Image (spheres, grey):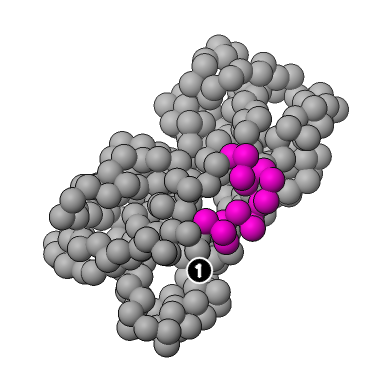
Amino acid sequence: MIAQLVINMKSGRARTHADATREALRAAGIDFVETAWPSDVVADADCIVCAGGDGTLLGAIDAAITRNLPLGIVPLGTFNDLARSLGISLDVRGAVQTIAARHERAIDAARVNGRYYVNEASIGVSSRITRLQTPELKQTFGFLAVIATAFEALRYARPIRAEVRFDGRHLRMRTIQLTVANNRHFGGFINVEDAAIDDGYFELYSVDIRNVYEAFAIAHALLTGRPFNGPGLHALRSQRFEVSTRRPHHITADGEPAGTTPALFENIPKALRVFVPQ
């Protein structure tokens, strides 16, 4: 097997695990050609191997789908939501062994305004949090960087007036955070029991906290994996959402910029092949 290897040296553990990744691939009998970007074409490649975090995968998704190649994941990021969802080892050797076994699973790809993602895309507070975080900050402080930037983002949080269209319905909502999730595991700690990455559907969550009681109820729902429709939190489910706002708002998809509103979120069922443990 010949792999196209892409290592994101800005990801959480890439600088210290890049050589270990190369060595593990050689030890597993996997020949590889290392490129700077997933879009660089390696003519004889049988797969694309991404070593980095969830953001690193974004460019690889497009390349893998366009070229009909399976994707191998060596999780070296801060959260590694996709790897955790698929049961891929966070250990370099374990992840490479999964790639070498070549057992594939087809999962849904998500797209917002033409840009692919796999876990979640957000408008509002978490989008601001992502923009406040720098690679250097995440490398130095890890999850503490998220906490610090979250407090900073909440200081400036203002309600967004959004319109959501889906399945012939048209809803107007007030929100400080709107998330369109493709994966059951996202945000580093949220794990939604009833969601799946290969069911062909999105879960949209809109948060508008107006008092401390709603804040505790929402935190409990998210931490236990059971989001609910109630004061402060609304959940919707569909294969496609159109979201517009009174003025343009930034969107982030798996931690990377993804344009601004208005936005079209599309689920593409089982479009991406990924190596997973058998």
Note whether 226 is above or below 74 in the view shown. Answer: below
Note whether 52 is above or below 34 in the view shown. Answer: below
What amino acid type is highlighted by mark number 1? Val
Residue extending farthest to the top is: 43
Residue bearing the label numbered 1: 192
Q: Is residue 189 left or right of residue 213?
A: right
- Residue 40, horizontal then vertical, whole percent: 52, 16
- Residue 156, horizontal then vertical, whole percent: 37, 61
- Name the secondary structure under disc 1: loop
Task: In this rendered view, identify the residue nearer to me: 127 or 51.
Answer: 127
- The residue positioned 30% from the left and 55% from the top of the image is 239
Which region shows up in magenta? 135-149
Task: In this rendered view, identify the residue nearer to me: 268 or 146.
Answer: 146
The N terminus lies in which quarter of the figure? top right
- Residue 5, horizontal then vertical, whole percent: 65, 24
Q: Is residue 68 left or right of residue 112?
A: right
Task: In this rendered view, identify the residue nearer to me: 260 or 184.
Answer: 260
- The residue positioned 55% from the left and 77% from the top of the image is 224
Q: Is residue 132 visible?
A: yes
Q: Is residue 107 left or right of residue 269?
A: right
- The residue positioned 64% from the left and 58% from the top of the image is 144
Quadrant location of residue 214? bottom left
Note whether 224 is above or below 36 in the view shown. Answer: below
Residue extending farthest to the right is: 27
- The residue positioned 34% from the left and 55% from the top of the image is 123
Residue extending farthest to the bottom is: 213
Q: Is residue 117 visible?
A: no
- Residue 232, horizontal then vertical, whole percent: 34, 78
**Label 1 packing within 10 angstroms: few (<14), some (14-19), many (20+):** many
Characterize the magenta stretch by its predominant secondary structure: helix
